[in-house]
Amino acid sequence: MPNRRDDADIMYRLLVQGVTDYAIFMLSPDGTVANWNAGAQRTKGYTAEEIVGRNFARFYAPEDRAAGLPEQGLRTARRDGRFESEGWRLRRDGSRFWAQVVIDAIHDDDGCFIGFAKVTRDCTERRRSENRIQHLAGHDPLTDLANRATLRQALTEALASGTGESCAVLYIDLDRFKPINDTLGHSVGDQLLQEVARRLRRMAGAQDVVGRLGGDEFALILRPADPHRVAGVARQILEALNQPYTVKKMPIRVGASIGIAVAPLAGGDADILLRNADLALYDAKKEGRSRYSFYEPAMGDSVAARTSLENALGRAVARREFVLHYQPIVRARSGATIGFEALLRWRRPDAVAPSPAEFVPVAEEAGLMPEIGAWILAEACREAATWPAHLTVAVNVSATQLRSALFIDAVERALAASGLPPHRLELEITETAVLQNREVALGLLQRLRALGVMIALDDFGTGYSSLSFVHTFPLTRLKIDRSFVHGLGRDPQATAIVRAIIGLSRSLRLAVTAEGVETEEQRRLLAKERGLDLQGYLFGRPEAAARLDRTVELRRPARRAALSRDDRPSVQGQPEAA
């Protein structure tokens, strides 16, 4: 009869042999495999006949065997009673798997060491999941480039390496990307960004790091940062990114601008280098895009001044420091005033009078224009409602206003609060503003025309798609850019362009205004055209509302007598006597 200990051994062997999720086997003191369970066969691919009697070191990769890792594990288990580790192990076919390993030292009832019990578990899928999670934490999910945190860490390590080599940060921003994203859709934009990432990755060296900072902004850390190499790489990037793309069978072109900061001259800290590269990028864009700029200390002064201006603008909105001035628009033949353009002015407490060309772009980027624009609409409509009924008011619309559905509400509130009839309000748009979100802008402008509001296309003739705009958008007026008016009488091409625009407007029944009229000769030449309106310093500079009363009253009595039938514009949806 077997004793109780024999029964226990039999039950233990049956239990161990039946386990399939774990490789469980015994090792002799020298590491020879003594037995083998089903889990070991499934995990490692050997049958018991093939492996029993052989040394377990064959499960380790050659480099691990050369480093003596199998023997180290046995020595640790013998000394401490247990050894635990994770690492790559080999199957019979030579493939690798990630193993969780436990080796226990085994002693008999008398305390004598007799060998080892080894348990191995295949954790390859867990390892892959962990690696994937770790990779995602440090990489951009769309392009698989390093993300901002990883890029910053790599830059920090490069600066702290102490090798004596400098490094450079190239801050890369795509030009003309937003219109593509808005007009062709985000899926096309995403594929374009992926192709940009592939082109940047191909240009990176073994020590370089390419990352995506967000949106259409990328960065490249160059090591080493020899000035000639940095400039050469920047030129290669501009050339590569400017090459045509094909996304969903559509040809697409974008460019790029690059700001460069080289350590240690531009800073010895990762955050400072990134910031200074961003400053250099702003300089590159300001100078015309599709170019690169190296950081210079004076750029910091420029940004400080811009930040100060932005802060002052924020205070100006809260303190209502803005005023409107009005410039007259007159009929070319009669000289009768038909309306005014409302122009924004900033009345600063320090008596400084910054130009709108200086502060409006800053207000746009700071997100202040929707609030300022709503005030302009309300104030212009309120003032125009006090004028004689034949006078109109024109208000410029910013790009940010055209991107917001709240703009419609602002127009409706301004008209309702003032009581101004919609046809006496003219909104002036530019192609540049519309291109930033063409579909949204088109929908907004169609709704505004349905209200009865007039729509003018400003700076006509300077954009590359003006005829497309005239055909697609619900316009009521074209404004000839001042650059063509200045050439009248001197430049035959400018004269021909002005006549062509006037002819186009007549055939489409659009009103037309010539801007920038400053001389009597320009007025005389334009007065030959029927139904043309004029605007410029020759007829008056922009003035505060309080100074308009006399001008309006002087011109109003003569208006009806001065206007002949041929002098009245024919505009779709506009009263003939407007």
Image (cartoon, helix red, strand yellow):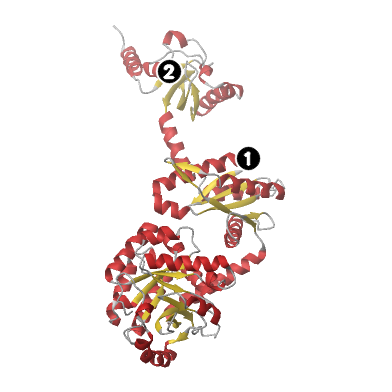
Mark closest to the chain's N terminus, 2 or 1: 2
Asked if residue 468 shows in the view, the reply is yes
What's the residue type where badge 2 is placed? Phe
Q: Quadrant of residue 36?
A: top left
Q: Position of residue 135 (x, y in %)?
A: 47, 40
* Left or right: 250 in relation to 487: left
What's the residue type where badge 1 is placed? Gly
State the CA–CA distance, disc 2 to disc 1.
Answer: 48 Å
Quadrant of the drawing holding the C terminus: bottom left
Q: Position of residue 572 (x, y in %)?
A: 31, 69
> What label sits on residue 24 in the rendered view?
none
Which residue is pictured at 65% across the width and 59% down the height? 295
Q: Label 2, on which residue?
A: 25
> What label sits on residue 205 in the rendered view?
1
Quadrant of the drawing holding the N terminus: top left
Query: Between 7 and 109, which is closer to the camera in this rendering?
Result: 7
